[in-house]
C-alpha cells in the first residue's frame, strides 16, 4: 500500500467527506468560516489531510459529548447551514 499523501486535491477531500467536488466548492467558505474546516494551503494549493482528519475527529467527539450532556438552544450547531 502506498504511503498516504500529506495534501489532497479538492476532489479527494470531497470524497473523504462523502460528497462530490461541486458540493465542496459550493460549501467550502461556510465549512471554513462557520465550522473551522482546514483551508487550502496557499503554498501547495491543496488541503492538509491530517488537519482534515483531526477536524473530523474533533467534531465527532464534540457531537458525542453534546448528545450526552444538556444543550440549550444557543449551544446547538446549525446543521442546516448548507
Image (cartoon, helix red, strand yellow):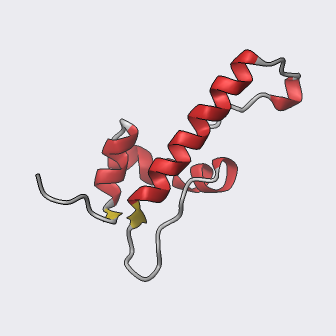
- Please tell me which residue is depicted at 43% across the width and 49% down the height of the picture: 24
In-image side of 3 versus 70 (left or right): left
In-image side of 12 versus 73 (left or right): left
Residue 34 is at least partly visible in this image:
yes
Q: How far from the left and from the top, in percent, is residue 49?
A: 39, 58
Q: How far from the left and from the top, in percent, is residue 64?
A: 64, 24
Q: Is residue 51 above or below residue 16?
A: below
Q: Quick one: quadrant of the C terminus?
A: top right
Q: Quadrant of residue 20?
A: top left
Q: Is residue 34 above or below residue 81?
A: below
The outermost residue toward the left is 1
Residue 82 is at least partly visible in this image:
no
Q: Is residue 22 above or below residue 61?
A: below
The outermost residue toward the bottom is 43
In-image side of 79 versus 77 (left or right): left
Q: Quadrant of residue 3?
A: bottom left
- Please tell me which residue is depicted at 49% across the width and 58% down the height of the picture: 51
In-image side of 23 versus 11 (left or right): right
- Please tell me which residue is depicted at 52% across the width and 54% down the height of the picture: 28
- Please tell me which residue is depicted at 29% across the width and 52% down the height of the picture: 12
Q: Is residue 57 above or below residue 38?
A: above
Q: How far from the left and from the top, in percent, is residue 48?
A: 42, 64
Count the marks: 0
Q: Quadrant of residue 81?
A: top right
Viewer-proximal residue among 15 and 60: 60
Q: How far from the left and from the top, in percent, is residue 46?
A: 38, 68
Amino acid at each position: 500500500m502506498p504511503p498516504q499523501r500529506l495534501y489532497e486535491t479538492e476532489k479527494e477531500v470531497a470524497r473523504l467527506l462523502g460528497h462530490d467536488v461541486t458540493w465542496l466548492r459550493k460549501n467550502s467558505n461556510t465549512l471554513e468560516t462557520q465550522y473551522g474546516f482546514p483551508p487550502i494551503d496557499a503554498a501547495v494549493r491543496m488541503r492538509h489531510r491530517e488537519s482534515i482528519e483531526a477536524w473530523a475527529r474533533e467534531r465527532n467527539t464534540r457531537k458525542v459529548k453534546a448528545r450526552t450532556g444538556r444543550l440549550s438552544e444557543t449551544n446547538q450547531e446549525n446543521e442546516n447551514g448548507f
